Image (cartoon, grey):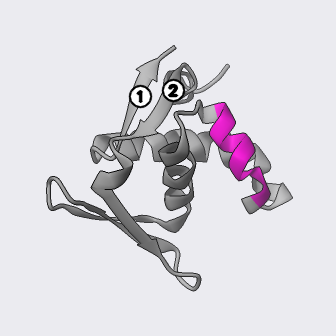
Amino acid sequence: MAHPFIERTVLALWSTVSPARLSFASWDDDDLAVVYDKVTGDTHLIESSAIEILRVIEKYPASAEAIAQELAELFSADDQDKLPQFISASLLQLRDLGLVTDTPV
């Protein structure tokens, strides 16, 4: 049985609030990244791997499954089974910050 928050994220298409609205930066030697929202003036400190999710969905709305497929090569074989949970948790965090939106399918 899937975890409830995974089910909520799987049944939606995810997109950034607006690609022009967000600026983000990450560094190769750091596990954290920053996202600046030009509309609200808020700066958010997030995991640098969450930036990769933003990069995927700023191009086109995508399901959590499509995001996981796109990012699978960035994760080790040992972490592949944790990828759906990570994607789901990251999407919910990004939504709570007001950086992404979800549309039920």
Q: Earlier in the sequence, mark 1 or mark 2?
A: 2
Most distant residue in the bottom direction: 29
Residue at horizontal 33 percent and vertical 41 percent from the top: 17
Residue 38 vs residue 27: left or right? left
Badge 1 amino acid = Asp
The residue indicated by pointer 2 is: 13
Residue name at image x 67 percent, y 32 percent: 65
Q: Which mark is residue 1?
A: none
Pick the residue in front: 86 or 64.
64
Which of 85 and 38 lies nearest the eye of the viewer? 38
- Count of numbered tags: 2
Local crowd size for mark 1, using a 10 Å CA cut-off: few (<14), some (14–19), many (≥20): many
Q: Are marks 1 and 2 in contact (CB under 8 Å)?
A: yes
Up the image or down, 2 lies above or below 71; here it is: above
**Residue 66 painted magenta:** yes
Examine the residues drawn in magenta and state their main secondary structure: helix
Span of residues in magenta = 65-73
Taking depth in this image into account, of 15 and 78 the one nearest to the observer is 15
Q: Residue at x 51, y 22 (%)?
A: 12
Outermost left residue: 40
Does residue 38 appear in this view?
Answer: yes
- Would residue 96 be found to the left or right of residue 64 on screen? left
Q: Amino acid at mark 2?
A: Leu
Q: In which quadrant of the rendered view does residue 67 lie?
A: top right
Horizontal side of residue 41 vs 104, given as left or right? left
Examine the image and state in which quarter residue 81 appears. Answer: top right
Tell me: 16 left or right of 54: left
Q: Which residue is mark 1?
A: 102
